[in-house]
Amino acid sequence: MANSVGRKAIVVLNLSLIIIAVNCGHKGAPLVKDRLRPGLKKVASLNNRQILFSFSEGLDIKSLKPEDIAITADSQALKIITVYPSLSNAEIVAVTEPQKAIVYNVSGTVYDSSENKGIFKAQVTGSVRPDTIAPIAKTYSQGSRRDDITIQFDEAMDTSSITIKILPGKSFTAVWTDYRTVNLLPRDSAEVLRNDTTYYFLIRDCRDLSGNRITPLITRVTPDTAYQPLYLRGKVKYNDTLAAGGWAVLSRDRPIGIARIDRGEFLFEVRDSLSYWTDAVWGDRHGRAEVRAGQENLVDLKPEKFDIDSLIN
């Protein structure tokens, strides 16, 4: 009996030693806190309103503030309107008032994601080259289960320039949360989107701080939580040639949808397979045709000036 107990004790001891050895062999290295400070690698003027800063690592974007960066020349400060990340969090763009072709002193503080503080000083030559690149809607709300729209642009915008049209008719207001992000919200309770309707938001006339306009943007919204859409497709031709661009407006009693004509085709999301009317405009050509979901639809254009704005307004 004693020998049996002794053998069991030896087996348990050996197993314990094996477990300890295995755990020690796979023990990870102790965690090390990031103590490296972010450093400025490069600064360059992109145009007369934008200066790009490149850093050695990603920054804490939420902590970025225009007042944390100074740009001066001959004791005169160049006003910074806003700052935001560029292609990555390691690059930021400072939007300034118009620059001069002189050397500016730049200095400031930034923080990385571990709250390490980086202090930088450098020089950059200002640019007088204008910004001619049109802004882009980088992200925007679309699809089902929505009752508002949020749009984020790729650069700072003129927050007084946006024009919104909603079909079927609703009235929304633009609320900018920063220079790049705008929320489109109902003006009052009567303008809240209905659950049984698909809405088309047309956003246009929106400009960046240099006056460059966006390409008009259309996005569809349906507040329904369980909605299976039908798609109404069609083609637009002029003398057997597909329209290279233009607009199509869908109507039934009143305008209820708008779409861009892309390579001669338009697409609408509709609620039923009954008849609608589509007005198509391409330059100084206009056509109108009865259309339905699930069938081949064709709108033939004729030489005729037609104002889409007068139709949707």
Image: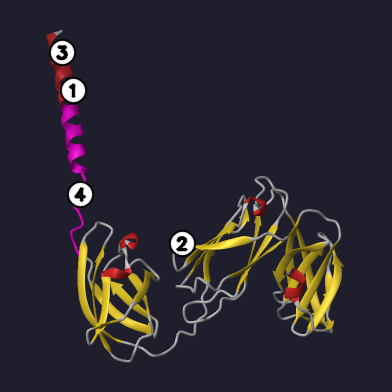
Position of residue 290 relative to residue 127, above or below, is above
Q: Is residue 71 left or right of residue 148?
A: left
Cα–Cα span, label 4 and label 2:
38 Å
**Could you say which is closer to the camera, residue 295 or residue 108?**
108
* Numbered circle sitting on residue 12: 1
Residue 90 place in picture, x, y as percent: 32, 68
Q: Is residue 157 left or right of residue 280?
A: left
Q: Residue at x 15, y 13 (%)?
A: 5
Q: Residue at x 47, y 82 (%)?
A: 210
Position of residue 70 relative to residue 196, above or below, is below
Position of residue 91 relative to residue 20, above or below, is below
Cα–Cα span, label 4 and label 1:
33 Å
Label 4 neighbourhood size at 10 Å, few (<14), some (14-19), many (20+)?
Answer: few
Label 1 neighbourhood size at 10 Å, few (<14), some (14-19), many (20+)?
Answer: few
Query: Looking at the picture, which amino acid does disc 1 mark?
Result: Val
Cα–Cα span, label 2 and label 3:
75 Å
Label 3: element kind: helix
**Could you say which is closer to the camera, residue 149 or residue 38?**
149
Residue 154 place in picture, x, y as percent: 47, 71
Can you identify the residue that label 2 sits on? 177
